[in-house]
Amino acid sequence: MKTLDSIPTGKIARAGTLVHTGVKVGGNYMKYYGKKLLDPTTSREGLDGDNAEDIYNSLKTLKGSALKVAQMLSMEKNMLPSAYVEKFSLSQFSVPALSAPLVRKTFKKYLGKYPEELFDVFQKDAVNAASIGQVHRAVKDGHELAVKIQYPGVAESIGSDLALVKPIASRMFNLQGKDAERYFKEVENKLVEETDYLLELRQGEEISQACSMVPNMVFPSYYPDLSSDRILTMDWMEGVHLGEFTKTDFDPLLGHRLGQALWDFYMLQIHGLRKVHADPHPGNFLVGDGGELIALDFGCVKELPAEFYIPYFELAKRDRLGNDVFYTQKLHELEILSVGDTAADIKFFKELFKEMLTIFTAPFQEERFDFGAEGFWSDIASLAERFTQDPRIRKMNGARGSQHFLYMNRTFFGLFNLLHDLKASVEVNNYKKYLD
């Protein structure tokens, strides 16, 4: 894949790239409708494929938060057409890398030296290029290292990038009015944090230490002296990306073991630390040769304030859903219901969220839960389809619920997705023995 010598960093240049893409997408629609006139049976698959290709090609040139949003959307398998999911999922580890001269320039700017002055061996070609940064292999004092380098201008362009994608996101999730701003601000704050590699280093060290007792979980060590806010150095970890592993004919017992490690890892963070690795993308985990699960990339960590954590998990207790007074109170605490709601609104949302909670809290009602069971996953898929197609839901303002739902729900949906791909059966309360 061709390397990049520069990345558009100015607001006008980045907006111009997306406008050019919009023209291409418009042309794709014209071609589609032309074919449709000649052959009424023509499907949208070709149109979706062409649009996904053009949009992705534009975003991978821009990199940064625009590409990160595409990566986030690739996890919404039940919301986007398959062509978009397939293409956007490449943003995790298949985008053009920075050229060697631009890499050397970045090192000089943020660490004061060129890479060949800092490492005994530094491979000039990236082994992995994603939305915010790319990874190079290096060696120092006999240690194999992974060095992550952030793309120039990523941190500075977050605000302008989000302003460009707001109209698309607002239509997709039916977000209206000033209430939607808190959701966009939540995303913006998290993206800003992800560009601070020294914060990622601290978060990685904290969570790794707190979860080190979980069997079959392995974490890299970090090297502060070889890191800065835009360059991060850690151990090189050998393994297969979890997304690639789940496509193989793996041993079911290994799937259960990896799934248990993943479940305990997440539950220990949530209930022990009240914070969580909120980017459960398969590209952020490796399966080692010894059958261990390796956790990478702690840039996106979501803290769970008590005012959200307590009512959120109180509603995970199935018997509480039958207590209407308690249930209604918790929906108000979570900002799903508000004082201005009509009686019809209250009835509709209480029924809707009870259905959601019944499905999503199903694992917490069992001693052992089989995430490979098709019934559970089909229930989630059916609910997601209903959310995108039910005209009553689409007419409602999507800006309901605390902004903390954004990354908490993303975490659980991604976690359930990974456990489903592993066909894992897990002991639900096993993590409790690791809590202080």
Image (spheres, helix red, strand yellow):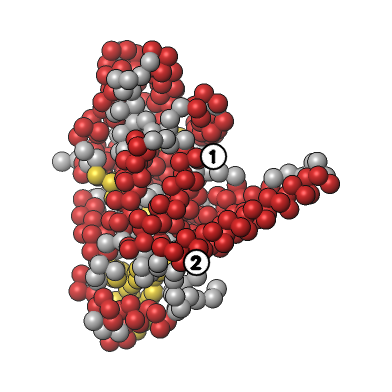
Furthest toward the left, the residue is 436
**What x and y, as percent, mark residue 350?**
39, 19
Residue identified by numbered label 2: 61
In-image side of 152 versus 200 (left or right):
right
In-image side of 16 versus 280 (left or right):
right
Q: Amino acid at mark 2?
A: Thr
Q: Is residue 30 above or below residue 412?
A: below
Residue placed most toward the observer, 20 or 257 = 20
Quadrant of the image for the N terminus? bottom right
| Point 35% across, 82% down: residue | 104
Q: Label 1's element? A: loop
Location of residue 204 (image quadrant): bottom left
| Point 50% across, 49% down: residue | 74
Residue 92 visible, this orientation:
no
Q: Is residue 30 above or below residue 20?
A: above
Residue identified by numbered label 1: 78
| Point 35% across, 48% down: residue | 187
Q: CA distance from mark 2 to mark 1?
A: 27 Å
**What x and y, as percent, mark residue 303?**
24, 44
Furthest toward the right, the residue is 38
Tag nearer the camera, 2 or 1: 2
Residue 297 visible, this orientation:
yes
Quadrant of the image for the C terminus? top left
Q: Earlier in the sequence, mark 2 or mark 1?
A: 2
**What x and y, as percent, mark residue 294?**
36, 57
Tally the numbered discs: 2
Q: Amino acid at mark 1?
A: Asn
Q: Label 2's element? A: helix
